[in-house]
Image (tube, rainbow, N blue to C red):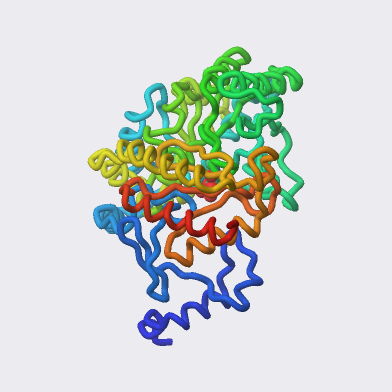
Amino acid sequence: MDTHAFANDPDQIVEADRAHVWHHLSQHKPYETIDPRIIVEGKGMRVWDIKGKEHLDAVSGGVWTVNVGYGRERIANAVGAQLTKMCFFGGTLGTIPGAQFSEMLIDKMPGLDRVYYANSGSEANEKAFKMVRQISHKHYGGKKNKILYRERDYHGTTISALSAGGQDERNAQYGPFTPGFVRVPHCLEYRSQDGSVGEEYGAKAAQAIEDVILAEGPDTIGALCLEPITAGGGIIVPPKGYWDRVQEICKKYDILLHIDEVVCGLGRTGTWFGYQQFGVQPDIVTMAKGVASGYAAISCCVTTNAVFEMFKDDTDHLSYFRDISTFGGCTAGPAAAIENMKIIEEEDLRGNSTRMGEHLQNNLLGLMEKHRWIGDVRGMGLFAGAELVTDRDSKDPVNEKQVAAIVADCMQQGIIIGATNRSLPGYNNTLLFAPPLIATKDDLDQITDAVDQAITRVLG
Ligand code: PLP
């Protein structure tokens, strides 16, 4: 086959995709009659599909990843130069970009010390779970091995990451799961059961974690794994005081605090990491998506020195962290991550996220005044959600077809927005916004104008 001709023939590419690609998170039945959408090019906040249509991207590559925006030649060039010089060496040996990026990263994370490289968010979380399990064997006779996770949080797609998954739609039909994961309640104030709000609600949600710890037995719990702000489970910003109490509880019962920064990391909320908004000090932090903004695959599991030291003991041949990630040794990831971090710093994208985040929140609150369907607006920095309900008293979620129709209407208008998981009642009703951190007021106005029109058309 003439590959050049193939590359220039959009219909042939669409057919190849339809025939052979199994898309992520997709029911393929509709592709029998509609074309799969293929993205071919991006610049800044905009992407173009294979039919030539321009889209404004309000979700940073669909899954909140491309923090610095599209078309950054300097990242591509750094990766190209690094791959030409030294593409890969894995196993026990180090690489120059691996060392350099770890130093840059630790500089942004006071109190943390060691970077373990992997490829995806799920994998970084698996590394953390394995560390916790091994610590339990090495230091607690195998007993302190349970890992607590929270309803509505998500930590990845592998079986053990799903075992820590608080979104039932993602878990259904994939069991049996890994034992030793225990669920604690969510902290979504909007859905407070007893009417408590603010700090009172936050204290109760944190108390619910302590209650689970006491019921399970504190000497059986090794770690608590939480997202700083729940992402796919509905953009849930915990109320003031919640995180302080969580930290106290972890200290009280000698439980490692593992914070999953796969979404919130690298400037998304306006600070380098989401946990830094709340003044907490984690023992383990995992990150992926924004680390290299999607220009290369990289994830990190970062720990304190105290955690690291627990594995530094050569008296026992099983005592070191006996884990490997073949492509966690690829140099493209840290080479891209170095440039990505420099761009965030030089262009003050954290500051832009804070400033533009306020604009986005104000726009969404404006829509809330206009549309009775919007029950709640939440978020921090360029990370926001608008929860849709049939009426504000009952807070019953609008149905998933209506949410999908709003997202599709925006797509038709050339604006890509997101929504939380589709088929689980109570989860499927939050519109989701996480644009690249370069967004301007004008971009955000275009996004919320499209949502305004879509809500009117779909819900009235
Ligand atoms: N953790 C969180 C909070 C996520 O949102 C995701 C993915 O969306 C993951 C972990 C898993 O990351 P990955 O898809 O790179 O495995």
Is 195 left or right of 261, judged from the image as shown?
Answer: right
Q: In which quarter of the image is residue 130?
A: top right
Residue 387 seen by the camera: yes
* Residue drawn at the location 64% of the way across and 24% of the way down: 205
Q: Nearer the viewer, residue 81 or 150?
A: 150
- Check the image and report above or below for 351 versus 433: above
**Residue drawn at the location 35% of the way across and 45% of the way down:** 437
Can you tell which quarter of the image residue 209 is in? Answer: top right
Instruction: Using the image as rendered, state which of residue 91 and residue 36 is in the foreground.
Output: 36
The image quadrant of residue 276 is top left
Residue 160 visible, this angle = no
Query: Residue 101: x and y, percent?
Result: 33, 39
Residue at figure coordinates x 25%, y 57% from the top left: 73
115, 292: nearer the viewer: 292
Q: Quadrant of the C terminus?
A: bottom right
Residue 15 falls left or right of residue 80: right
Tell me if residue 397 comes above or below residue 133 in the rendering.
Answer: below
